[in-house]
Image (cartoon, rainbow, N blue to C red):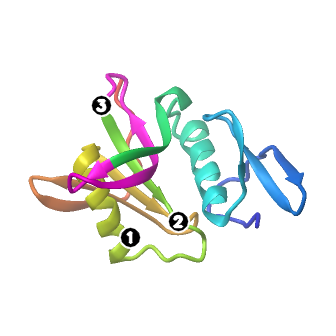
């Protein structure tokens, strides 16, 4: 379950309950079943906080939202700016799920109701960072700094 990702190695608190392994989520402050997608999500949370200095207090994990008026979905991670505006939508996939045009359109669709400036897609090894500016998709090579 614990796989090497294209990120620095971070220590996590794990516990075993029966035949299942759980990982401690420091934002939600509870143990969650360790699935391949949850492993990527927890690694990305620590990476955003440790390497990019995005405060955990500005991250919201698996928040429900609606798009197309009545379709309920959950976003993996939304990072807010210091004014409370959505800054980045992060969509995490399991390591064996490729980052494709389909996953990009999924994130863009979710972002229509969230309105984050940036969208980050990752499976822990592949990363796609983009924004929609004036109705056009722009791809970025550098992770943005959180505005002060």
Mark 2 and mark 1 in contact (Cβ < 8 Å)?
Answer: yes
Residue in the picture at 36% in, 30% down? 81
Residue most extreme to the left: 134
Taking the magenta stretch, the answer to whether it contains residue 5 is no
Q: Quadrant of the C terminus?
A: top left
Q: Which label's residue is closer to the chain start, 1 or 2?
A: 2
> What residue range appears in magenta?
66-84
For residue 43, side relative to residue 116 (left or right): right
Near mark 1 (Cα within 10 A), the count class, few <14, some 14-19 or many ≥20, is some
Q: Is mark 1 on a helix, strand or loop?
A: helix
Whether residue 46 is visible here, answered yes or no, is yes
Determine which of the numbered discs, if any, sits on residue 94 in the image: none
Q: What element carries label 2?
A: loop
Q: In which quarter of the image is the N terminus?
A: bottom right
Q: How far apart are marks 1 and 2 (CA)?
A: 9 Å
Q: What residue is disc 2 on?
A: 93
Q: What residue is disc 3 on?
A: 85
Query: Looking at the picture, how far across and down is residue 33, in whole percent?
Result: 72, 54
Taking the magenta stretch, the answer to whether it contains residue 75 is yes
Mark 2 and mark 3 in contact (Cβ < 8 Å)?
Answer: no
Determine which of the numbered discs, if any, sits on residue 103 in the image: 1
Q: What element carries label 3?
A: loop
């Amino acid at each position: 379950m614990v796989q090497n990702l294209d990120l620095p190695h971070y220590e996590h608190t794990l516990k075993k309950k029966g035949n299942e392994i759980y990982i401690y989520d420091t934002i939600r402050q509870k143990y969650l079943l360790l699935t391949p997608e949850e492993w990527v999500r927890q690694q990305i949370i620590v990476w955003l906080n440790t390497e990019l200095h995005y405060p955990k207090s500005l991250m919201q994990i698996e928040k429900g939202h609606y798009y197309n008026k009545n379709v309920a979905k959950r976003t993996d991670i939304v990072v807010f700016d210091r004014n409370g505006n959505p800054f980045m939508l992060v969509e995490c996939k399991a390591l064996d799920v490729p980052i494709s045009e389909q996953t990009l359109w999924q994130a863009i669709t979710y972002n229509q109701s969230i309105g984050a400036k940036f969208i980050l897609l990752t499976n822990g090894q592949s990363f796609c960072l983009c924004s929609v500016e004036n109705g056009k998709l722009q791809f970025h090579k550098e992770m943005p700094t959180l505005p002060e």
